[in-house]
Amino acid sequence: MNSPSDTLDLQFYLRERKILVEQALINQLDACGRWQESRLQQAMHYSLMAGGKRLRPILLLACCEAVGGETVRALPFACALECIHTYSLIHDDLPAMDNDDLRRGQPTCHRQFDEGTAILAGDALLTWAFELAAQSLPGLPGELQLTLLRQLAQAAGQHGMVGGQMLDLLAEGQTLSLAEMQNIHVRKTGALLRISCLIGASLGGGSPQQIKQLTRYGEAFGLAFQITDDILDETGDPALMGKSPGSDRKKAKSTYPVILGLPQAREEARIWVEEAENALKDLSETSQPLRLLARHLLSRTS
Ligand code: GRG
């Protein structure tokens, strides 16, 4: 159980990290030139800066620091992950996918601009992410530079997030087994969370064993995150979530609460949080934010 002081520290940590990431994103946008004059860049800026927890960059930085690495090197790669995540949300909200009006408490990108602009803003964020990621690489061994970019592409693409989204589309209206649903989530949501941890640990100069442990943490965190996301969709406060709850049930999606029932879904989340905590066992005090972050999933409200 986390004590009130742990919670307080984590809230402070998350706030401070969010500010760090958002400032880095603003700096990167500004470095692109006069974005106010380009409709494409306005749309990218709109969605990127519309809020969000910045969980993937925060995980990347925390894993980098857990193995003694420097935040400064990792920051551009952390921004890259937020760009890929934001692109996925823009495309997921489109009429051809979830057809949502609200994201992060604001009109979705295609509602604020138009469908074509939203598609292109997503495309541009995805490709820009690789430019940003490359900024973290100078000075690392050449082989490692290529490996990190390949791992990012794999997590985002057909075998990772995009592949998971395809399976999710195909599964609409069908009753899935727990294993089938888990397979979708491991790719759709889990792949980016996992790679955030793996890349953070690699950029930080972690040993093969430390990288393995933090990757395992990311996998378990990803599942716990998805289960708690499904639970929030049933029980959450729309004002805190920035979107309407109940959307999964309306779309007849298989979710953890639908398949397992709410109490068992909560138990499943607890099991994966423990798994994430266990993965950190041999890591030093520097992994404390990761430990608290995993536990925090069980009481998240957004
Ligand atoms: C369209 C290629 C493509 C992929 C979309 C990730 C995804 C795949 C769709 C998002 C749909 C969704 C709501 C999935 C549930 C888990 C999830 C990714 C929630 C949103 O992530 P948060 O909570 O969002 O980290 P914020 O706004 O805090 O960044």
Image (cartoon, helix red, strand yellow):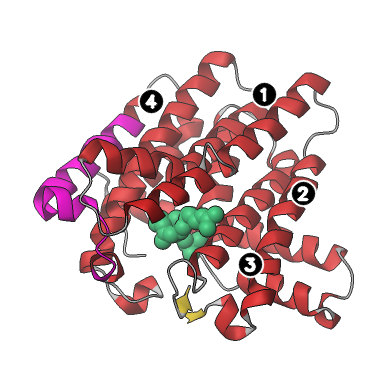
Looking at the image, residue 13 lies above or below residue 252: above
Amino acid of disc 2: Leu
In the image, 65: left or right of 2?
A: right
In the displayed orientation, state which residue is furthest to the right: 33
Amino acid of disc 1: Gly
Callout 2: SS: helix
Kindly report the secondary structure that dominates the magenta region of the rendered protein. Answer: helix
In the image, 246: left or right of 17?
A: left
Callout 3: SS: helix
**Where's the N terminus, which quadrant?**
top left
Q: CA distance from mark 1 to mark 3?
A: 29 Å
Mark 4 vs 2: CB contact within 8 A: no
N-terminal label among 4 and 1 = 1
Which quadrant would residue 143 be assigned to in this image?
A: top right
In depth, the one of 46 and 64 nearer the eye is: 46
Q: Which residues are magenta?
A: 250-276
Q: Is residue 94 visible?
A: yes
Task: Tell me the crowding category of disc 1: few under 14, some 14 to 19, or many 20 or more residues within 10 angstroms, Cα based.
Answer: some
Percent x, y for residue 53?
A: 49, 61
Residue carrying label 4: 279
Q: Nearer the viewer, mark 2 or mark 1?
A: 2
Q: CA distance from mark 3 to mark 2?
A: 14 Å
Q: CA distance from mark 4 to mark 2?
A: 29 Å
Amino acid of disc 4: Ala
Task: Tell me the crowding category of disc 4: few under 14, some 14 to 19, or many 20 or more residues within 10 angstroms, Cα based.
Answer: many
Residue carrying label 2: 132
Looking at the image, residue 107 lies above or below residue 4: below
Q: Nearer the viewer, mark 1 or mark 3?
A: 3
